[in-house]
Image (cartoon, rainbow, N blue to C red):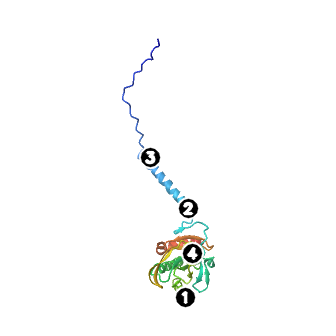
Amino acid sequence: MTQDAPLVEADTSPTRPPDPPAKRSWRSSLALALFTVSALLGSVWIANKVSNPLNLYGTALPANKLAPPLSGTGDDAKPLALTDLSGQTVAVFFGFLNCPNICPTTLAALERVRQTLPADRQANFVPLLISVDPKRDTVSKLNEYVKYFNPQARGMIIPEPQLAEGAKAWGVGYQYVDVKGPLEYQVNHTTGVYLVDARGRLRLVWDYTQVTTNPERVAQDVVAVMK
């Protein structure tokens, strides 16, 4: 006869719930939060130093990016290309002579920037207005217009379709609106100002508000790029 295995009495005692996780003190939680925020800010700071090592006020563009070519007729009625201004720091702005406020305000602000520069740097800073209205803007009017704001400023008229191609390469848009006749209309256009260094590299872009409200900080960018 086979001996039966001994019976084991079932444990009927109530099951003990697992111990709750140890509570983290508020000091530990605060320290962890501060560490996380510091790490995040540190990574942002490192990324900014890599993409913007000069701590520029404007939007820094990729290093060693050559400015797209621009060529047309200068305000002196002679052929003019952006490369002709090599050796100077050029602030490129797209606008038109019948512009009611954006263009004159921008050119006036760029003159304040020039005056803010150290005396030995002012002659090397050249605003360049590219007309987005070649149908109405003439060389003689362009010359009078830019020189009113700055004796060193230059202007350029580029015929279509070269103008559209050049503007696209710069990321600039323009559109004729409120058209009432062949020579009666307004032009909506990109209002940024692009800075090209003495070696022809496109270094940064300022928006309209930056240029017109903080010429001192814009001038600091110009000096940094000139070095």
Q: Earlier in the sequence, mark 3 or mark 2?
A: 3
In this view, the residue in front, 72 or 165, is 165
Mark whose residue sits in front, 1 or 2? 1
Q: Give residue 31's position: percent from left, percent from top.
A: 46, 49
Q: Amino acid at mark 1?
A: Ser
Q: Amino acid at mark 4?
A: Glu
Q: Give residue 225's position: percent from left, percent from top.
A: 58, 71
Q: Kindly identify which residue carries mark 1.
A: 140
Mark whose residue sits in front, 3 or 4? 4
Q: CA distance from mark 3 to mark 4?
A: 59 Å
Label 1: how many residues lie within 10 Å, few (<14), some (14-19) or many (20+)?
A: few
Q: Earlier in the sequence, mark 1 or mark 4?
A: 1
Q: CA distance from mark 3 to mark 2?
A: 31 Å
Mark whose residue sits in front, 1 or 4? 4
Task: Answer with the quarter of the image where residue 200 lies.
Answer: bottom right
Say whether marks 1 and 4 touch (CB < 8 Å). Answer: no
The disc label shown at residue 28, or none: 3
Label 4: how many residues lie within 10 Å, few (<14), some (14-19) or many (20+)?
A: few
Element class at badge 1: helix
Q: Earlier in the sequence, mark 2 or mark 4?
A: 2
Q: Earlier in the sequence, mark 1 or mark 2?
A: 2
In this view, the residue in front, 20 or 222, is 20
Task: Answer with the quarter of the image where residue 22 lies.
Answer: top left
Q: Kindly identify which residue carries mark 4.
A: 165
Q: CA distance from mark 1 to mark 4?
A: 24 Å
In percent of the image, x 41 and y 42: which residue is there? 23
Position above or below: 10 against 19: above
Q: Kindly identify which residue carries mark 2.
A: 49
Say whether marks 3 and 4 touch (CB < 8 Å). Answer: no
